[in-house]
Image (spheres, rainbow, N blue to C red):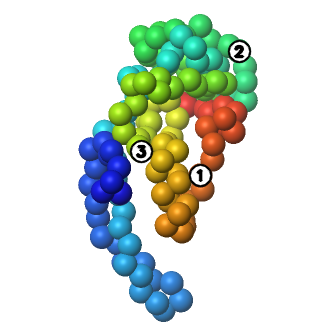
Amino acid sequence: MKDFSLPNHQVFPARVFHKGVEFNYYLVYFYPPVEEEFVDFERSDFIRAHFGFFKEKLDINSLEDYKIAKDQIQLPYGIGFSKMVLKQDVINCDIFRFALLGLGIYISENLKTAIEAAGLTGMQITPIEAIKHYYVR
């Protein structure tokens, strides 16, 4: 990870026991989550969702539009996206996480290649194109 651009983070040692064998791992926590600076709101498509199911398209073209819509939508509904477009020219790190716009950790192609080459396990890497929609409340 030292060869990659990381956002603010903390590293914690973690001892894991599995079938009586101790393993020494590290937990990396990224803070604060990134939000609006990486999202192209004008090219992304947002929806009003009910437990992740599409209800209607929302007219959201900016972070301000998103915040207004989020304040107006009442449970059990939430905001999801049917297409999220990232501003690749603005992303300045190899790994980041979202909070408002969907949980998950996003990584660069370079970091993905390094993870696979090192044989690291314990994670599932899904191409961004395979993420159909995400529900957020």
Q: What crowding class fits label 3: few (fewer than 14 Cα within 10 Å), some (14-19), or many (20 or more)?
A: some
- Foreground pick, 37 / 93: 93
Q: How far is mark 1 from mark 2, CA to CA?
A: 29 Å
Work out whether residue 130 or residue 31 is closer to the camera in this orientation and state it.
Answer: 130
Q: Which residue is mark 3?
A: 95
The residue labelled by disc 1 is: 125
Label 2 secondary element:
strand
Q: Position of residue 62 (x, y in %)?
A: 46, 11
Q: Amino acid at mark 1?
A: Ile
Image quarter hosting the N terminus: bottom left
Q: Earlier in the sequence, mark 3 or mark 2?
A: 2
Q: Residue at x 71, y 15 (%)?
A: 56
Q: Residues within 10 Å of mark 2 (few under 14, many from 20)?
A: few
Type of the residue with mark 3? Ile
Residue 96, x across and y down, in percent: 41, 41
Q: Is residue 84 at all visible to an observer of this figure?
A: yes
Q: Residues within 10 Å of mark 1 (few under 14, many from 20)?
A: few
Please give the name of the residue rendered at 32% of the width and 46% of the height, measured from the top-left corner: 6
Q: Say what amino acid the circle numbered 2 marks.
A: Glu
Which SS class for mark 3? strand
Along the line of sight, the residue nearer the viewer: 82 or 51: 82
Q: Residue at x 51, y 26 (%)?
A: 86
Residue 15 is drawn in which quadrant? bottom left
The residue carrying mark 2 is 56
Looking at the image, is 98 positioned above or below residue 114?
Answer: above
Of mark 1 and mark 2, the one earlier in the sequence is 2
Q: Going by the image, does 75 lie left or right of 89? A: right
